Image: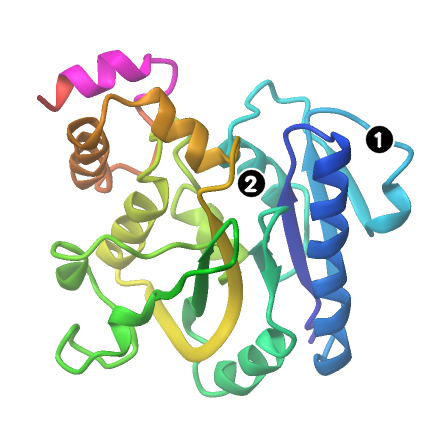
Amino acid sequence: MNNDITIVIPLHTLGSENVDFLKKAIDSVRTCQKYYNDGKLIVSVVAPFEDSTNTNLVDKWILNDSGDTTYCGQVNYAVQHIDTKYFSILEYDDTYTEKWFKFFKDYVFGNEDVSVFLPLTIVTDAGGEHWQYGNEAALAEFFSSELGFLDFDCLQDWSAFALMGAIINREDFVNVGMYKPSIKLAFDYELLLRMTNKKLRVMVIPKEGYKHIVGRENSMMDVYRKEMDGTDEVQKWFELAKREYQYTEDRKKGISRKQKVEEVK
């Protein structure tokens, strides 16, 4: 069996600052490879442009000419152009912990039916001065019906799970409908609702696997939050996710953000 894993890095622009972050992110994959001896970690950058100066950094450069250059659109396009059983999303300004894929290898044994393996994520601010864990709630006793797993019921009360760094079964991701680009901010949550509603298994491996920076100027989440009108609008995206999970297709694609928000008021 081929145990290669594709690392998908969505890239929207490539300025000098981005290149420095990108190199650091890719270096973390190369370090992980030293501990993951079951297959190759294939670094695949997906972008709406070609770049000949940095292709030596990556294994595969995927030109996204679909016209959808949102984060979700980038990931969806990449997943349709890879052929490994599993893939993982690495944001270009984040890094993996060195043994994350080794931990996956240890935990996938006996859990081959799991569709998504989430890491314990170390979340820090841009200055690296403050940190907290992400995805840790599933490790609390009585949080869900099975310790360490997410289910549809527990997601009704807790939405703070993120898929960056997760190792995802590509076929399950495609069959469930992939990301819905029309849903901003709450797209991970909506996808997890959709997957668990269809009884796909989502597991949190109780090991630190990913380091995520929040609050960085001009990051995706920073841009999204600046576009929104405060907490109320953020909440409405999560309410929309609770309505849309039951549909496989992104029925709202092409409708403006303002229109969608108005629908859930």
The image shows residue 32 at horizontal and vertical percentages of: 70, 73
Residue 165 appears in the figure: no
Is label 1 or label 2 in front? 1
Residue 249 covered by magenta stretch: no
Q: Circle 2 — which element? A: helix
Query: Where is residue 158 shown, x and y percent of the image?
Result: 18, 57
Q: Is residue 258 magenta?
A: yes
80 left or right, relative to 29: left
> Position of 205 compared to 43: left or right?
left
Front-lying residue, 258 or 232: 232
Disc 1 to disc 2, C-alpha distance = 18 Å
What segment is highlighted magenta in the picture? Answer: 252-262
* Res 255 quadrant in image: top left
The kind of secondary structure element at disc 1 is: loop
> Which quadrant of the structure image shows residue 34?
bottom right
Provide the residue designation for mark 1. 51
* Residue pointed to by mark 2: 75
Residue displayed at 31% across by 39% down: 186
Q: Amino acid at mark 2?
A: Val
Q: Quadrant of the N terminus?
A: bottom right
Residue density around tag 2, few if under 14, some if 14–19, many if 20 or more, within 10 Å: many
Q: Amino acid at mark 1?
A: Asp
* Residue at (50% x, 56% y) in the render: 212
Nearer to the camera, 62 or 97: 97
**Lower position in the chain sequence, tag 1 or tag 2:** 1
Give the residue at x 59% y 54%.
Answer: 94
For the point 54% across and 55% down, the residue is 170
